Amino acid sequence: MATIHDIAKIAGVSTSTVSHVVNRTRYVSPELVEKVERAIQELDELPNFIIKKSRTSQISTGLKYIFILISERGSQFQRQTEECVKELLADTDYTIISAGYDKDTARLKVIKNMILATPDLCGIVAFPDEREILTEAFFHEISVPVILIGKAVKGLKADVFSPNMYDGGYQAAKHLIKNGHERIAYMGNSRDLSTWRFEGYQKALHDYGIEENPQLVFPNLNTEVEVFQVMDEMMAQEVPPTGIVVANSFPIIPLLKYLHAHNIIIPKDISVIILNDFEWASLLAPELTCIDKQPAECASLTVKTLMKRMRGEKGELQKETLPVRLNVRNSTQGIGRGPFGEKAESAEVLELSEAEKEQIRSQHYTAAISFHYTGKAWMQLMEKGIKKIFEDLGISLIAVTDAHFEASMQSKQLDSIRFLSPDLLIAIPVDSQDTAEAFQKVVKSDTKLVLITNIPDGIAPGDYVSCVSVNEYSHGRNMGHGLGKYMVRHKMKYVGIVRHGNQNFFATRQRDNAAEQVLSEEFPEIRICGEISFQSETEVYKKAKEFILHHPEVEAFYVSWDGPALEVLRALTEADRTDVAVVTGDLDYAIAMNMAKGGMVKTLSAQCPYEQGEAIALAAANALLGKQTPSFIGIEPVLVTPENLLKSWTDIFKDNPPGELRRAIRENLPYFTME
């Protein structure tokens, strides 16, 4: 029986070449493949190693070839699609030969000669380039079926499958816009701007009323030096971009190098989204948000169609645009916004030096607080945080009022406070309209005004020191993300949205929109089956009962905050629908006990009112020194789950959890293990 050495001697090649031809472990020129196959066919009896290989992998000795023509070796999508095609054809009689022409005309000529010299060529899969180096003329004399991926070739009759990069560019820009970004840069390495992805980016800006800025658009970046230069240019602008859409594979590595070298942190300082999904995108810190072109689906359709064409099936040529998917990870984050669209600043900017503290102490300032309602732990903790800072700075708190959610009462209380002439007034308006006149009188006085969460009508930045709130975008995102993960884990599909109907309240509007955005963008398998809009908490119970009746498919609810959430829980319990999951905002005893007992509340986002109180007092103190303070301060919320409930309670309330809560956790922990 012949050996591998005998075959090599007959063919006039090395034994390693014979091995590569039989095992398809490396590219071998068509001429040498033909010599080896001819030598094998001349044998009277096949060697054992060929018989064994043929049995295990169904490889015939008469090999058939499919060429994959790559326009850009650096393209992640092309490489991923190529690998998927190879996997799909691994157990067939076809040998795959990949060749990259990298937009090079001379290389393309060599590849064509190779194709024409290949025996038993059965089909071609080609990725046309944007510069149209690959033309219809290339395929003259080539009579096998051709599948094109990415774009058509003028004049060539072939099936064409393309990922929808117009939608990819649109989704990427829209994602950043919905996250509060307005200055969004575009970076790529296309020759010009006549690409679907750029047009999608433009359309998103137009649809959301953002003017396109040519100083933020750089389509033709081909070297690391060029990427560094444009980043220097953009970051030196008076208002640098807060988000970047990276359109092609090349710029991402130089961009990441630049950001690291300049200590620009993703996503804290800048959000980045890429129109390609790399295998390693989820391995970076932070993980990269990407547009997934879904190469596996494209490869599957390509192979299916190519096999059909190679069998001689004609039919109408297919030209399909394939859907892409937004994969939201950690390289993008929302920009919390204040009532006038200003970016939320961190409380870190409010820190005082010891000398500044001594200066304030020497003046014996006075302050007052006007709360909309003091009956909840949220306000009590905020007051505690304010008092802590004021006591340290020697600021006397001469009045704390409670309006019991009545605008007329708050207006009278504000008039009374004005007569006390405090140096500072801290207030959360009951209503932006009905208390407006009383607040405008405060603005005209010598008292410095610090607002909490909302702004009365007729008052603008400059009239008040600062507005301090939770970062409402993060608040809503926490709730949406927590609920989305729970629903996917438990194979739930339908969610109801319970939102605050007063669109004048920027805080709840931003929170509700952020939660809905996360659910729709990051969890496409989830469907919003309906919404409840309410003006007051007392409406929610009745509306929730009607909703459950008309939407029996509902499996979960997002509720804007804990008060209306309790009404939803009451309606669900009476309807015997305790199987429904609920997510809400703010941590209070009733909500905490429901979660601890394994009830319907599965996760929530909690404000940090004590820290908000500290920030409010520090903003007021900065104003006393004549320092410029940000017009909006956003305090980051905390995501609370059954696992961290006790710790979160301690961190937020600055006290040990109640005994009943600890007992409920001990008794029910196995019930809500998050596996």
Image (cartoon, rainbow, N blue to C red):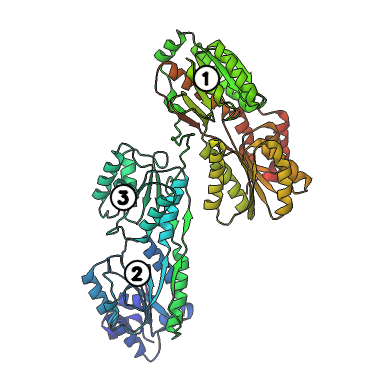
Dot 2 alpha-carbon crowd within 10 angstroms: few under 14, some 14 to 19, many 20 or more: many
Mark 3 vs mark 1: give the one in front: 1
Q: Which residue is mark 3?
A: 217
Q: Is residue 303 left or right of residue 651?
A: left
| Rendering coords of residue 229 (x, y %) | 25, 45
The answer to whether residue 278 shows anywhere in this view is no
Please name the residue that numbered disc 2 is placed on.
127
Residue type for callout 1:
Lys
Q: In the image, what residue occupies the spot 25% across and 53% down?
A: 223
Q: CA distance from mark 3 to mark 2?
A: 26 Å
Three-letter amino acid code at the position of disc 2? Phe
- Label 1 crowd bin: few (<14), some (14–19), many (20+), radius 10 Å: few
Counting from the top left corner in percent of width and height, residue 459 is at 49, 27
Q: Which residue is mark 1?
A: 441
> Disc number at residue 496?
none
For residue 543, what is the image quadrant? top right
Q: Secondary structure at mark 1?
A: helix
Please, what is the three-letter code of the amino acid marked with disc 3? Val
Relative to 573, is 4 above or below? below
Q: Residue at position x 54%, y 44% from top?
A: 513
Q: Is 537 left, or right, of 113 in this rendering?
A: right
SS at badge 2? loop
Labels 3 and 1 touching (C-beta < 8 A): no
Can residue 329 be seen here? The reply is: yes
- Is the N terminus in the top left, top right, bottom left or bottom right quadrant? bottom left
